[in-house]
């Protein structure tokens, strides 16, 4: 199967075929996600919480994102790899934005980047796309803005807030974004945005009407338990299975059962 491209995103939207996306942060999980046939892998700055154990995504650095994206790119044979621009890697200037976005393509092997924001990053998106760096935009709940938003809250609930999100969706599309993540917004608002845009929308907590869906892999397989957002569906409980396996290993070592002759050299 050939590697997923931006054109495949547009073809799926036109054919009303759902786009599938998951996060991954290392070689092993990226290999599994790729083998499952997922269209795109987002190397999200969410690694700050699910991999590094941080309280939010803000401390994650560009060098850390490049490091993790390199591992994912090595594993991905078919899925498009998208690198997530971390906090303060693009906000200070357009020049910073283009330079850091370029690192994902040049150093880390990604095919595109994602950045949070609407109108305030439109010029950044234009500059990136002019530099042949494909951009996935992200509006609604933007985790890098948690201090301004007052926490992880559903966005676009009032008529005024919904109107603003619709405007921002059109702005990032006009700026050249090839797709748009809609996070934690009412499903009818997501439906309207999806119908009005020519670019694909990817939902996370945005209901059923988006052109595709994305979730954090640790949520999907039950490895992250600090909190579980309403929009998450767990398809497995790997923490429980891993805990059982490790406890069994501990017991066998303590009782002298492992290693046996089968695991020993003669």
Image: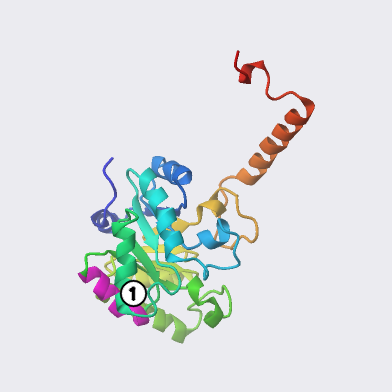
Q: Is 41 on the left-hand or right-hand side of 154?
A: left
Q: Residue furthest front?
A: 266
- Around disc 1, counting alpha carbons within 10 Å, would you say few (fewer than 14), some (14 to 19), or many (20 or more)? some
* Between 47 and 160, the one nearer to me in the picture: 47
User: Total marks drawn?
Assistant: 1
Relative to residue 8, is residue 86 depicted above or below?
below
- Could you say whether the residue bearing mark 1 is in a helix, strand or loop? helix
What residue is disc 1 on? 96
Q: Is 263 on the left-hand or right-hand side of 34?
A: right
Q: Quadrant of the N terminus?
A: top left
| Residue 229, percent from left and from top | 59, 63
Magenta region, main secondary structure? helix
* Between 223 and 8, the one nearer to me in the picture: 223
Question: Over which residues does the magenta segment extend?
Answer: 119-130
Q: Is residue 10 visible?
A: yes
Relative to residue 164, is residue 109 depicted above or below?
above
Q: Residue at x 40, y 49 (%)?
A: 72
Q: Is 125 on the left-hand or right-hand side of 259?
A: left
Q: Residue at x 39, y 47 (%)?
A: 38
């Amino acid at each position: 199967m050939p590697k997923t491209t931006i054109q495949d995103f547009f073809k799926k939207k036109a054919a009303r075929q759902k786009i599938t996306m998951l996060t991954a942060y290392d070689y092993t999980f990226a290999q599994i996600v790729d083998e499952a046939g997922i269209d795109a892998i987002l190397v999200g700055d969410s690694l700050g919480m699910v991999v590094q154990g941080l309280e939010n995504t803000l401390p994650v650095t560009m060098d850390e994102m490049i490091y993790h994206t390199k591992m994912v790119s090595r594993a991905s044979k078919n899925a498009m790899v998208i690198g997530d621009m971390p906090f303060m890697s693009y906000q200070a200037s357009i020049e910073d934005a283009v330079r850091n976005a370029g690192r994902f393509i040049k150093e880390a092997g990604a095919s595109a980047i994602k950045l949070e924001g609407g109108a305030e990053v439109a010029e950044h998106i234009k500059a990136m796309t002019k530099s042949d760096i494909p951009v996935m935009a992200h509006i609604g709940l933007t985790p890098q803005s948690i201090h301004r938003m007052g926490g992880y809250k559903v966005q676009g609930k009032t008529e005024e807030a919904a109107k603003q999100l619709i405007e921002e969706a059109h702005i990032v599309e006009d700026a050249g974004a090839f797709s748009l993540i809609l996070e934690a917004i009412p499903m009818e608002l997501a439906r309207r945005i999806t119908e009005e845009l020519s670019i694909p929308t990817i939902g996370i907590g945005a209901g059923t009407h988006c052109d595709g869906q994305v979730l954090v892999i640790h949520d999907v397989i039950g490895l992250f338990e600090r909190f579980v957002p309403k929009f998450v569906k767990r398809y497995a409980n790997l923490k429980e299975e891993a805990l059982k396996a490790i406890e069994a290993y501990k017991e066998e070592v303590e009782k002298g059962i492992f290693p046996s002759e089968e695991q020993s050299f003669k």
